[in-house]
Image: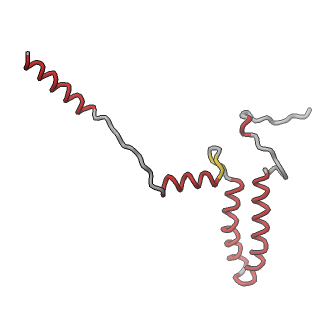
């Protein structure tokens, strides 16, 4: 009998485009291969295979993050914008507290004044 996996949460379903990857992941993987294979072949003649391999890994990382990384349902670029906005852009926050101790002191002073008046 053929069984089909159905996710518990239907909103997590992602349509696959090619080899189990979504269209976004496929585009990023093809772009990474198209950029890094010629880069590796060109750099390996000049700086050696080991260093060229490291450079290719570091140039592949941004494309891999853009294509495959999600955090709490946010894609990488949305998460990066939220982190940048939170850490580097000035934010206007209104800080307001209610001093309960001062309120209680004021109440007791008011009660003392009423007692003195009587």
User: In the visual, does 114 lie left or right of 88?
Assistant: left
Task: Choose top left, top right, bottom left or bottom right for residue 58.
Answer: bottom right
Identify the residue shown where x is 44% and y is 55%.
90
Identify the residue shown where x is 16% and y is 21%.
111
- Furthest-top residue in this view: 118
- Furthest-right residue in this view: 1
Identify the residue shown where x is 65% and y is 44%.
73
Query: Is residue 44 placed above or below 97 in the rendered structure?
Result: below
| Residue 6: % across, % down | 79, 34
User: In the visual, does 19 lie left or right of 80?
Assistant: right
- The quarter of the picture where the C terminus appears is top left
State the residue in front, 67 or 56.
Answer: 67
State the residue in front, 96 or 66.
Answer: 96
- The quarter of the picture where the N terminus appears is top right
State the residue in front, 43 or 99.
Answer: 99
Query: Is residue 118 placed above or below 2 in the rendered structure?
Result: above
State the residue in front, 64 or 103.
Answer: 103
- Furthest-bottom residue in this view: 46
Identify the residue shown where x is 67% and y is 72%.
55
| Residue 20: % across, % down | 82, 49
| Residue 22: % across, % down | 78, 50
| Residue 59: % across, % down | 68, 68
Specify how the rendered protein is coloured: secondary structure
């Amino acid at each position: 009998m053929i069984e089909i996996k159905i996710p518990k949460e239907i909103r997590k379903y992602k349509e696959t485009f090619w080899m189990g990857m979504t269209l976004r992941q496929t585009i990023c993987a093809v772009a990474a291969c198209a950029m890094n294979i010629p880069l590796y072949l060109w750099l390996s003649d000049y700086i050696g295979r080991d260093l060229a391999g490291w450079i290719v890994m570091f140039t592949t990382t941004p494309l891999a993050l853009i294509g495959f990384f999600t955090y709490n349902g946010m894609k990488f670029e949305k998460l990066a914008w939220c982190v940048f906005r939170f850490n580097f852009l000035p934010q206007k926050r209104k800080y307001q507290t209610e001093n309960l101790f001062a309120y209680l002191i004021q109440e007791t002073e008011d009660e003392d004044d009423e007692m003195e008046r009587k």
